[in-house]
Image (spheres, rainbow, N blue to C red):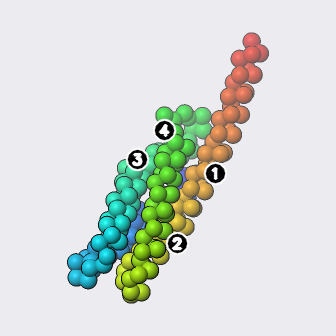
Amino acid sequence: MCAYSVSVNDVIERITEKLYPFIDAQFDEVLKLNKIEPIHLHLIEKIKALRIEFDSLKNYEKRLVFPAVLEIFNAQKKSSSLKSSVNIAELQQLIQRKENLIHTMVNDVFDEAMKTKKSHPIHSIIYTLKNSFKEEKEKWNVMVNEWNKNNLVSTHTNNVKDNQHQHAY
């Protein structure tokens, strides 16, 4: 397995098997506690909207992005000249837009959550999204962006060689 594939598998596993279930449990805890000890309606609506956006990101990644990236990375270890119909850079732009929206929403929730008691689980989910989520996603983005950069340089070099070869005849 190539170095990228090993790293990609590790990062995807950490995100999908550890981080996302942990965040899901935190959302569940906030929403369950809200039934017992209601917090401000406007704040709980923001939490619900944040969960919808988080679930959307999670589903895009689990169903589309992660399988596509793994397929491309694993295929390229077999043949470096393999061309893929999947544009990882475009997928990554979509995901980064969703991540940026989540970060904006978290900051918005954070401002309102300051009015809740410090022991409320809303503070835990905010902390997780601002720290662990952000760190894991940054690792992912750096890895994919580095791969994209290396792949573009390699593709450009191959295209230049192909063009030089064609013009020689």
- Does residue 82 sit above or below 32 in this rendering? above
Q: Is residue 111 visible?
A: yes
The mark nearer the N terminus, 1 or 3, is 3
Give the CA separation, mark 3 to mark 4: 10 Å
Residue located beneath label 2 in the image: 131
Q: Is residue 13 visible?
A: no
Give the CA separation, mark 1 to mark 2: 22 Å
- Does residue 66 sit above or below 108 in this rendering? above
The residue positioned 38% from the left and 58% from the top of the image is: 53
The residue positioned 55% from the left and 67% from the top of the image is: 135
Query: Label 2's element?
Result: helix
Q: Amino acid at mark 2?
A: Asn
The mark nearer the N terminus, 3 or 2, is 3
User: Where is residue 18 shown, x and y percent of the image?
Assistant: 41, 69
User: Is label 3 or label 2 in front?
Assistant: 2
Residue 152 is left or right of residue 119, and the answer is right
- Does residue 51 sit above or below 118 in this rendering? above
Q: Tag 1: Cα neighbours inside 10 Å, few (<14), some, or many (≥20)? A: few
- As drawn, the label of residue 33 is none
User: Where is residue 9 shown, x and y percent of the image?
Assistant: 49, 58
Q: Tag 3: Cα neighbours inside 10 Å, few (<14), some, or many (≥20)? A: few
The residue positioned 38% from the left and 86% from the top of the image is: 117
The mark nearer the N terminus, 1 or 2, is 2
Q: Amino acid at mark 3?
A: Leu
Residue located beneath label 1 in the image: 146
- Does residue 130 sit above or below 98 in this rendering? below
Residue located beneath label 4 in the image: 86
Q: Amino acid at mark 4?
A: Val
Quick one: quadrant of the C terminus? top right
Residue 152 is left or right of residue 101, and the answer is right
